[in-house]
């Protein structure tokens, strides 16, 4: 199969630049744009390039992507001056710094979510199952990004305390309280 043009890496070899720098140069000059992490041709770029669907055969993780090939005339219309390359390189540095900052924010969010879920589980495990009534765990992030967990609505009845203590000391017998009589429930003194 004959290649329909030059890839960014081949243009970079001619300019003494990396493929990333060439892609940024093409973006800065309006030939392509990044959409959902993939390079897409603009109307201006479509006049000078073609995109071909490529597929890897590395099963089970086969992937497909659009490969962009630029016609030989691209070097005639692309500003490849030292200033344009310096601007592209500076843009890449800004992009890398933004990606690094976003990665740190994402890691901090993931760490906080993990700590919050662990704290909620610890709160849930602190009260025996028979003693939980209307238990709600409220988990959020504090102002400094620290996980905060609050338990609301815990009610421990005496039988639950005995069951909890029995879990800790299996030698202690557990008794279940008898249900209240109807007289105690409705409050009437009639028999």
Image: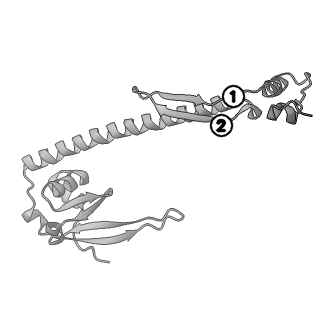
Quarter of the picture containing the C terminus is top right
106 relative to 81, above or below = above
Q: In this view, does 177 lie to the left or right of 23?
A: right
Q: Is residue 6 left or right of residue 185?
A: left
Query: Is 164 situated above or below 75?
Result: above
- Tell which circle, 2 or 1, labels the residue nearer the N-terminal end: 2
Q: Which residue is drawn at 40% across and 25% down?
A: 144
The residue at the point 18 percent across, 71 percent down is: 46
Q: Tell which of 98 and 71 is nearer to you.
A: 98
**The N terminus lies in quadrant:** bottom left
- Specify the color scheme: one colour
Q: How crowded is mark 1: few (under 14 residues within 10 Å), some or many (20 or more)?
A: some
Mark 2 element type: loop
Q: Quadrant of residue 106?
A: top left
Residue 45: image location, x then y, percent: 17, 67
Q: Which residue is drawn at 34% across and 40% down?
A: 102
Instruction: Relative to 146, say whether 14 is above or below.
Output: below
Residue 163: give x, y in percent of width and height.
Answer: 82, 28
Coordinates of residue 188 in the picture (x, y in percent): 83, 32
To which residue does mark 2 refer?
134
Whether residue 101 is visible, yes or no, is yes
Determine whether label 2 and label 1 are within 8 Å by CB. Answer: yes
Tag 1 residue: 155
């Amino acid at each position: 199969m004959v290649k329909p043009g030059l890839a960014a890496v081949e243009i970079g070899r001619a300019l003494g630049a990396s493929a990333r720098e060439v892609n940024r140069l093409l973006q800065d000059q309006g030939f392509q744009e990044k959409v959902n992490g993939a390079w897409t041709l603009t109307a201006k770029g479509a006049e000078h390039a073609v995109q071909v669907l490529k597929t890897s055969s590395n099963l089970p993780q086969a992937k497909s992507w659009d490969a962009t090939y630029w016609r030989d005339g691209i070097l005639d219309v692309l500003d490849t001056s030292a200033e344009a390359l310096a601007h592209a390189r500076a843009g890449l540095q800004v992009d890398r710094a933004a990606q690094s900052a976003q990665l740190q924010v994402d890691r901090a969010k993931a760490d906080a979510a993990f700590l919050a879920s662990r704290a909620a589980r610890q709160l849930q495990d602190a009260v025996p199952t028979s003693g939980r009534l209307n238990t709600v765990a409220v988990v959020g992030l504090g102002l400094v990004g620290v996980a905060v967990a609050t338990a609301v609505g815990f009610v421990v009845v005496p039988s639950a305390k005995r069951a909890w203590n029995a879990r800790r000391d299996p030698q202690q017998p557990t008794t279940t309280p008898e249900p209240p009589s109807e007289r105690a429930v409705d409050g009437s003194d009639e028999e």
